[in-house]
Amino acid sequence: MPDARHVQHCPSPLLTVAQGLMAEVGYGAMSMRQLAARAGLQPGSLYHHVASKQDLLLDVLLDILAQRLEAWRRGPYTRDLRGYLRFQLARQASHPYEALLLRHESRHVEPGQRGWLEQALNRSRAPLCQIIEHGQQQGRFTVGDIASAAEAILALIDTAEGMRRRPMPVDDAKIEAWVIQMSHALLSACPPAKRPARAARLTGAA
């Protein structure tokens, strides 16, 4: 695992163009010649900005995660679970390509670069983990594994995009209410290893 942050050399305007093209045709089908044409550059000059297609993919994914984290830090949302969920759902609706690329194109990252991506993913999950930890300290949440609980909540958030794309789309207010309700239910559930004694006896009796 790398012990320092990846240094990004690709300029932001080019990353934006690359993000849109990857979302449109997929990383595997995208060529650097296509990207140069879309960005208004000569194919050869593209390599003055990025060393390879693999490096470009890594830069695009890291930029998405960094932009999300910065948006959370600067946003007007409350620093609690409800505020975090509202932020993520709003970001998902306003930047639909981000989740698409993170979900489908991360598998193309080379093994030698996965450490950089995992570091960035951990940084992006950190605010949610801190919120869960704080709630647990206050006795509002009961979870056995904070990191796993955070992953489960992020998976819940991912389902919202599918709700919006249904033939009969679900209203955003209803999606938000459902995600908040399910997230609180998930964090309030006692882990199996710490079930109340009475519940354990009933299970045993069954």
Image (cartoon, rainbow, N blue to C red):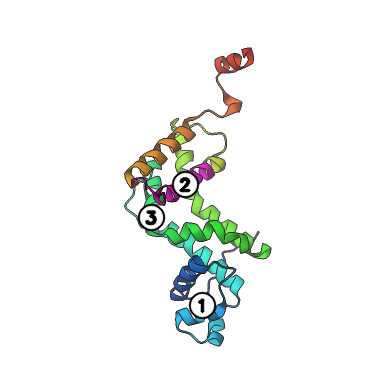
Chain-order first, disc 2 or disc 1: 1
Q: Foreground residue, 201 or 165? A: 165
Q: Main secondary structure of the magenta part?
A: helix
Residue farthest front in this picture: 167
Q: CA distance from mark 2 to mark 1?
A: 30 Å
Residue bearing mark 3: 93
Give x and y (percent) for residue 194.
58, 25
Q: What span is colored magenta in the figure? A: 150-171
Q: Is residue 82 left or right of residue 143?
A: left
Chain-order first, disc 2 or disc 3: 3
Label number found at residue 35? 1
| Amino acid of disc 1 | Leu
| Amino acid of disc 2 | Thr
Residue bearing mark 2: 159
Residue at point 52% right, 42% down?
A: 152
| Amino acid of disc 3 | Ala
Q: Kindly indicate the quadrant of the structure image that contains residue 119.
A: bottom right
Q: CA distance from mark 2 to mark 3?
A: 12 Å
Quadrant occupied by the N terminus = bottom right
Residue farthest top in this picture: 205
